[in-house]
Image: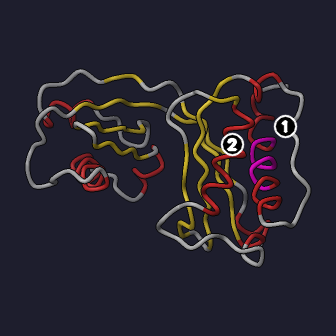
Amino acid sequence: MPDTDLGPILLKLARAAIAHRLGLAPAPEVPDDTRLHERGASFITLLRDGQLRGCIGSLRRSHPLGEDVMTNAIAAASKDSRFPPLTGEELDGIAIEVSVLSEPEFIDFFGEEELLAQLRPFEDGLILFSGCSSATFLPQVWEQLPEPRAFLNALKHKAGLPTNREVVELMAARYHVQKWKESEQAHS
């Protein structure tokens, strides 16, 4: 199958996993497609009326992609601490977005100004590391934070790092995503 077929398969798998978790459908089976059995990292974003309703994912390719998508879909619906667990009544009003991540690559930089100069808005997903703290933003977050300094400061805040001064021993990695999103009207 061409890669254009992958998105609809992953979206269907994510929705089926959530429906099963909510007791609305039988357990989904991963289709017999080699791409779904290769290791992959995914993020699942749930949206209701265009607003975030849950988002959880994996940064490392440590599980088969199909399994990773189902696990993260269930987690986005039930374990995102920012939201109460999704209910069966809400499922039809939710649009699902699946992002498949490339392997992260570390960025060499000395100081935050050099890091800012290397960021590619609307293209890079970014992971920040400082000691035991880390956080990531998918490339889609550039839509809300298009200015690189605001993007970096919001990511520092998410990681629990000070935003008003440069962080010492900061490390960063970038990645790209292939993403597919259900139409919000299709399920409401």
Picture quadrant of residue 185 = bottom right
User: Considering the image in quadrants, where does the N terminus appear?
Assistant: top right
Picture quadrant of residue 67 = top right
Most distant residue in the front direction: 132
Residue 111 in the image: state x and y as whole percent: 11, 32
Specify whether 65 is left or right of 158.
Answer: right
Marks 2,1: beta carbons within 8 A: no
Q: Give the range drawn in magenta.
A: 9-15
Q: Is residue 13 magenta?
A: yes
In the picture of the structure, the residue carrying the numbered disc 2 is 69
Name the magenta segment's main secondary structure: helix
> Total label count?
2
In the picture of the structure, the residue carrying the numbered disc 1 is 30
- Asked if residue 105 is positioned above or below residue 53 in the image, the reply reads above
Q: Residue at x 28, y 55 (%)?
A: 154
Callout 2 secondary element: helix
Q: Residues within 10 Å of mark 2 (few under 14, many from 20)?
A: many
Residue 14 in the image: state x and y as whole percent: 74, 50
